[in-house]
Amino acid sequence: MNRFHMLIAGLGLAGVTIPVAASAAPWQSINARQARLDQRIDQGIRRGTIDRREATRLRRESRQLVQLETRYRRSGGLSGWERQDLNRRFDALSARIRWDRNDRRYR
């Protein structure tokens, strides 16, 4: 037995599975992703890299995604297609935030 297995056996954890970092999916809940995007918008405003007009547009798009998620959930939960659609839209919003923060149009 290698040292790792001996350590696990010594601790009495032989029947417990330990998740391996390489197999862990880099997945965020929709609410966590929404919160992170809002933080990035706030950060851009504080740093002056996102102006008022850009922030208004980004927040409007963010609210529209929340409304879309609500409509999807009315049918009893998110299907695989609905989750993919939301992820694609969140990716696009994230790219727009990145673009607006790096377009060198400062206040």
Image: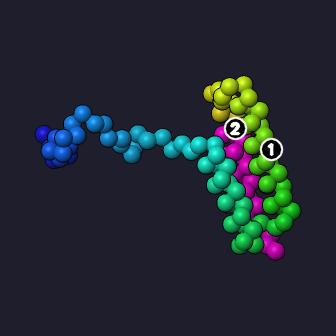
Q: Position of residue 67 (x, y in %)?
A: 78, 40
Question: Mark 1: which amino acid?
Answer: Gln
Q: Are marks 1 and 2 in contact (CB under 8 Å)?
A: no
Q: Judging from the image, what secondary structure is the residue with disc 2 in? A: helix
> Which part of the image, by quadrant, shows the C terminus?
bottom right
Main SS, magenta residues: helix
- Which quarter of the image is occupied by the N terminus? top left
Instruction: Compare marks 1 and 2 and give the one earlier in the sequence.
Output: 1
Position of 19 compared to 97: left or right? left
Q: Where residue 21 sits in the image (x, y, percent)?
A: 39, 46
- Provide the residue designation for mark 1: 64
Q: Is residue 102 visible?
A: no
Residue 78 on the magenta segment: no
Q: Which quadrant holds residue 87?
A: top right
Q: Is residue 89 magenta?
A: yes
How many marks are shown on the rendered structure? 2
Residue, x 69% and y 38% (percent of image)? Answer: 86
Q: Is residue 56 left or right of residue 65?
A: right
In percent of width and height, residue 105 lies at 80, 69
Q: 76 above or below 88?
A: above
- The CA distance from mark 1 to mark 2 is 11 Å
The residue segment tinted magenta is: 87-107
Identify residue for label 2: 86
Frontmost residue, 29 versus 102 = 29
Q: Which secondary structure lies at badge 1?
A: helix
